[in-house]
Amino acid sequence: MNFQKLLKVESYQTYLDFAFNSGKKQAELIRETKFKDKLTKSKNVEIERISVVRNTLNSHLGNILKSFPTLDDLPPFYLELVRITLDYGALKRSLGAVLWALKKLDYFYEGYKNKIKHISELSQINDARRDYYGRVSSVMKQIKNELEYLEEARKIMKGFPMIKTSVKTVCIFGFPNVGKSTLLSKITGSTPEIKNYAFTTKSLNIGYLKNEDFAAKKIQFIDTPGTLDRFFKMNLIEQQAYLALKHCCDGVIFVFDLTECYSYEKQFMLFENLKKIKPDTPIIVYLSKSDMINKTDKLKIETFVKQFKDKYKVEAVYDKDVVVKKVLSFLDM
């Protein structure tokens, strides 16, 4: 989903000013039209004016509702992301308040249109229009706080990653700086579709693999940094990565750093956490930075390959081409 297209939510007064100015311009145009008498002309001018005011406000408020997703229809990843980054109840109430305002604006428009139609005194027409403006202003002022919250929510939601929840997805999981991004770049080719999505001070990397062997299909890879912290202690990017792992992935590449950027013990602990989170999901282990260890330590590679196979029933490899083949295999592509 792409939250970059969420429309900026203005203040209630901005919407009112725009609507009233539009109504004024339309009224000036109608005044140039000839009518049989002043009363008929004044009625038509003011009905057209309040019609433009209603339509302008309806357009702006309606676009807000169209821009924001229907919360209950969000994929699980995004629904949970909304819940941890925003006040879900406040967001839902704010969208409901905009819908309420739309209905009230229609109600007052119909009421004052009919009232103006049946006025018999010229002096009463401007009074009716002023009353209508007062009603409309009151409705918009009542959703002042809700509009402000929607704008706050929009700014946060624009930082959500554009994960395609309908395509095959593989999470590249491991501690930060163990070689996940390097592997992502290698897998997706020399010119990968990699984008950075700002989320607080860090970013989430997403890449896509596509070639002539399966041109009609695309595999999405998500760089998901791991942590041994409990969920409520994770920072936002770590929580986001956890949710991607939980809700989006069809397979996992666990990146194990042979140079011990993180201790082997901690990396095995993280791997065991992964197995608890995704017990039924295919996993392959990628032994990263194998070219950076000395000849003596290279014996460790075979040790780890055997350990992952014997203890966890998981294959461990250090060749990225083998990783790709294994991914295609467990995704049935």
Image (spheres, rainbow, N blue to C red):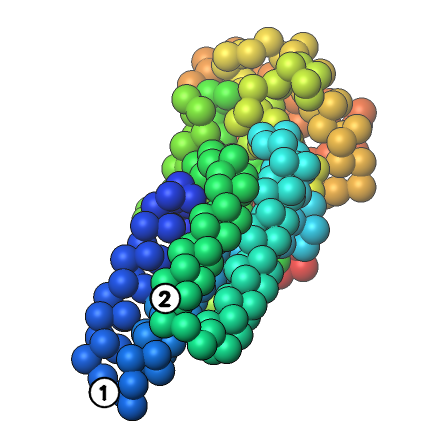
Closer-to-camera residue (249/94)? 94
Quarter of the view holding residue 275:
top right
Characterize the local packing of mark 2: few (<14), some (14-19) or many (20 or more) Cα atoms within 10 angstroms. few
Going from the N terminus, do you reach mark 2 or mark 1 first? Answer: 1
**What numbered label is drawn on residue 52?**
none
Total tally of numbered discs in the picture: 2
Please name the residue that numbered disc 1 is placed on.
34
What's the residue at 22%, 84% (across, down)?
33
**Tag 1: amino acid:** Lys
| Image location (x, y in percent) of residue 228 | 66, 15
Characterize the local packing of mark 1: few (<14), some (14-19) or many (20 or more) Cα atoms within 10 angstroms. few
What's the residue at 49%, 30% (across, down)?
180
Q: Helix, strand or loop at disc 1?
A: loop
Please name the residue that numbered disc 2 is placed on.
123
What's the residue at 34%, 79% (across, down)?
39
Relative to 228, residue 247 above or below:
below
Closer-to-camera residue (279/322)? 279
Instruction: Say left or right for 188 vs 94.
Output: left
Q: Helix, strand or loop at disc 2?
A: helix
Check the picture and name the quadrant holding the C terminus: bottom right
Q: Looking at this rendering, what residue extends furthest in the bottom direction?
A: 36
**Tag 2: amino acid:** Ser
Instruction: Say left or right for 32 vs 272.
Output: left
Quarter of the view holding residue 52:
bottom left
| Image location (x, y in percent) of residue 134 | 45, 50
Closer-to-camera residue (180/29)? 29
